[in-house]
Amino acid sequence: MNIIKRLTGVTCLTVFLGVLAPTTIAFAKTSSTNDSHIVKPDEQSDEPSDAVGFAGYPSSTRSEHIDNTETLGDSLLRPGDAGDFVAQLQDELRELGYYSGDINGIFGTTTVDAVLFFQKSMNISEKGVVGPETKTVLYDLYRHSSEAKAYQEKAAQIEAEEAEKEKERRLAAKKAEKARKAAREAQIAAAEKEAAEQAAREKAEKLSSEQAADSENKPAVKNADTARETETMPAPPSSGSKTITVEATSYALGGTTATGVDLTRNPDAKVIAVDPNVIPLGSKVLIPGYGTYTAADTGGKIKGHRIDLHLPTKEEAINFGRRTLQIQILN
């Protein structure tokens, strides 16, 4: 009976030690703080640890670990290493402001100092080597930094596009304002031109009226040669007549003369305005080129050797102008 009890106790102790041993070993591996005991990623199994209650990747989730290995590799990075993974490490550290050297892919003194500075800033237990913990923290920070940089670049692009649109809007508004200003100036110029033309027409009409009413008109160019010949042609002598030299003008108006001749009803009446002190009213006067006229009117400006011929139309009066003639007083 005692033998059976002893055998049962030994069997239970053996089973207990068999279960406890693997757990104790796994705990020792995962709890070690000695850098010489850091397990290299390439030495670890792809399968989770057999230790009870512990994960296979201590500092990150499985998906984060896969992302880390894609950027910095699955192996421990140590001083003296070289290659693309070291170059990526240098690039990420420089992006975060910890590294200022060249991206040469060599894990040298400058890179070691940058790694130590980063690990100290982030309270990472790894010292001088880049293992899973350092890779995880570095990946998270670099990823967020890259996203922030991409966001800043996108924001800058949007801002530039908005600035360009605003520039185009201002340019379009400036062109529209310039077009409106040109249209206003064109309207003003057209109005000024119309006003000038109207003023010119009114002035011409007024001048025409003054020439018709006033004996002092400018000589016409038309028929100038004929006028000169008439002016120099002496009147034929006649017995009992008197020849004098006068300054002659003309008019074409209606109304009644000083002696009662109705020029409105008789526009073709051959009458002249004279100074009665020189040519008595009622006298017959021979005017070269125009025939015999009757001295039947007077005028305020017709003084001395001045006469004013009545002609049927204003055009004839204007064309007559002002002339010096030798006329013959027939009686």
Image (cartoon, helix red, strand yellow):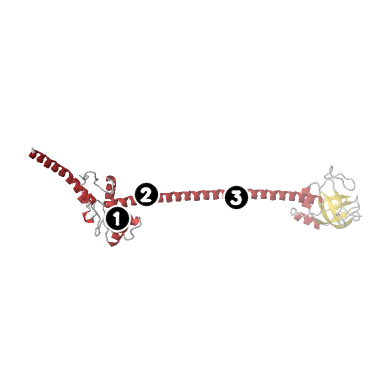
The numbered mark at residue 89 is: 1
Residue indicated by mark 2: 147
Residue indicated by mark 3: 181
Q: Is residue 196 above or below residue 11?
A: below
Q: Nearer the viewer, residue 247 or 1?
A: 1
The quadrant of the rendering that contains the N terminus is: top left
Label 2 secondary element: helix
Q: Residue at x 44, y 48 (%)?
A: 158
- Give the x, y percent position of residue 55: 25, 45
Q: Residues within 10 Å of mark 2 (few under 14, many from 20)?
A: few
Question: Cα distance, mark 3 to mark 2?
Answer: 50 Å
Label 1 secondary element: helix
Q: Are marks 3 and 2 in contact (CB under 8 Å)?
A: no
Q: Amino acid at mark 1?
A: Leu
Question: Cα distance, mark 1 to mark 3?
Answer: 64 Å
- Give the x, y percent position of residue 112: 28, 59
Dot placed on the residue nearer the N-terminal end, 1 or 3: 1
Q: Amino acid at mark 2?
A: Glu
